[in-house]
Image (cartoon, helix red, strand yellow):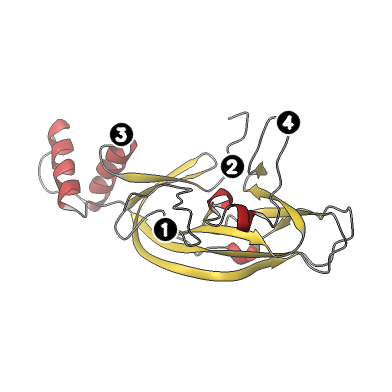
């Protein structure tokens, strides 16, 4: 399986961005975390948030989605849709907007689930408890604004050489650096991180925050 964000096969279901023992590079604001997946679990569709009633022509306050918080050492991969007739603006941590264009932030309406059945256009990632937020725009009076989400949770640990190929690459890098003897866990992690930075071992880049225009 080739892992990358926003993947689609035009089906309703979607694949996790990484599998067991895959390497991931998690980007969160100005931090980069190199990790290895050691556990993955699917999360079936659930109501992530209900913003409540919203009058016609009104825009809700920006509201954090606390139900998407992940445990420490975990990240989540989610796709979502709105069950009610509202347009939704989506915000990632660090006050960043998702779908950020120079002159517009296009909202996502309920038709996304029929126009884009895989929902890959709504995909986002959550690193630990750094939750996203939403803002709803109502064209008509609504009794509720409910967001449904589904996805995967990943438990991750610091990098180490797991596969034969990774072990061979670590040995090769040790030779390049004239390193002798048995590596400590910390040294092995450092070498694996260097291999990931240089894309000499397979790893998937995951963005859990927004990329603003000024970055």
Q: Position of residue 90 (x, y in %)?
A: 67, 50
Q: CA distance from mark 3 to mark 2?
A: 23 Å
Q: Secondary structure at mark 4?
A: loop
Q: Residues within 10 Å of mark 2 (few under 14, many from 20)?
A: many
- 27 or 77: nearer the eye? 77
What residue sits right under mark 3 in the picture? 198
Q: Which mark is first along the chain, 4 or 3?
A: 4
What residue sits right under mark 4 in the picture? 103
Q: CA distance from mark 3 to mark 4?
A: 35 Å
Q: Residues within 10 Å of mark 4 (few under 14, many from 20)?
A: few
- 204 or 14: nearer the eye? 14
Disc 4 + disc 1, Cβ < 8 Å: no
Residue at 62% x, 48% y: name it: 92
Q: Nearer the viewer, mark 3 or mark 1?
A: 1
Q: Residues within 10 Å of mark 1 (few under 14, many from 20)?
A: many
Q: Secondary structure at mark 3?
A: loop
Residue at 27% x, 49% y: name it: 186
Compared with residue 202, is residue 142 higher up or lower down, i.e. above or below?
Answer: below
Residue at 67% x, 34% y: name it: 101
Residue at 33% x, 49% y: name it: 2
Q: CA distance from mark 2 to mark 1?
A: 22 Å
Q: CA distance from mark 3 to mark 1?
A: 26 Å
Disc 3 + disc 2, Cβ < 8 Å: no
Relative to 20, 32 lies left or right: right
What residue sits right under mark 2 in the picture? 210
Q: Secondary structure at mark 2?
A: loop
């Amino acid at each position: 399986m080739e892992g990358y964000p926003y993947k689609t096969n035009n089906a309703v279901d979607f694949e996790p961005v990484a599998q067991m023992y895959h390497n991931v590079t998690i980007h969160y604001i100005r931090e980069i975390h190199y990790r290895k997946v050691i556990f993955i679990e699917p999360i079936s569709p659930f109501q992530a948030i209900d913003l409540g009633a919203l009058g016609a022509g009104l825009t809700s306050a920006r509201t954090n989605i606390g139900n998407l918080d992940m445990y420490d050492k975990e990240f989540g991969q989610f796709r979502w849709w709105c069950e009610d007739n509202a347009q939704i603006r989506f915000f990632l941590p660090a006050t960043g907007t998702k779908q950020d264009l120079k002159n517009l932030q296009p909202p996502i309406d309920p038709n996304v689930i029929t126009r884009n059945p895989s929902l890959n256009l709504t995909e986002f990632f959550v690193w630990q408890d750094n939750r996203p937020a939403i803002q709803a725009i109502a064209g008509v009076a609504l009794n509720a604004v409910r967001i449904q989400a589904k996805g995967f949770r990943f438990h991750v640990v610091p990098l180490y050489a797991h596969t034969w190929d990774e072990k061979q690459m670590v040995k090769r890098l040790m030779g390049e650096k004239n390193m002798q003897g048995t590596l400590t866990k910390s040294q092995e992690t450092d070498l694996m991180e260097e291999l990931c930075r240089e894309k000499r071992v397979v790893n998937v880049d995951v963005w859990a925050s927004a990329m603003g225009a000024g970055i």
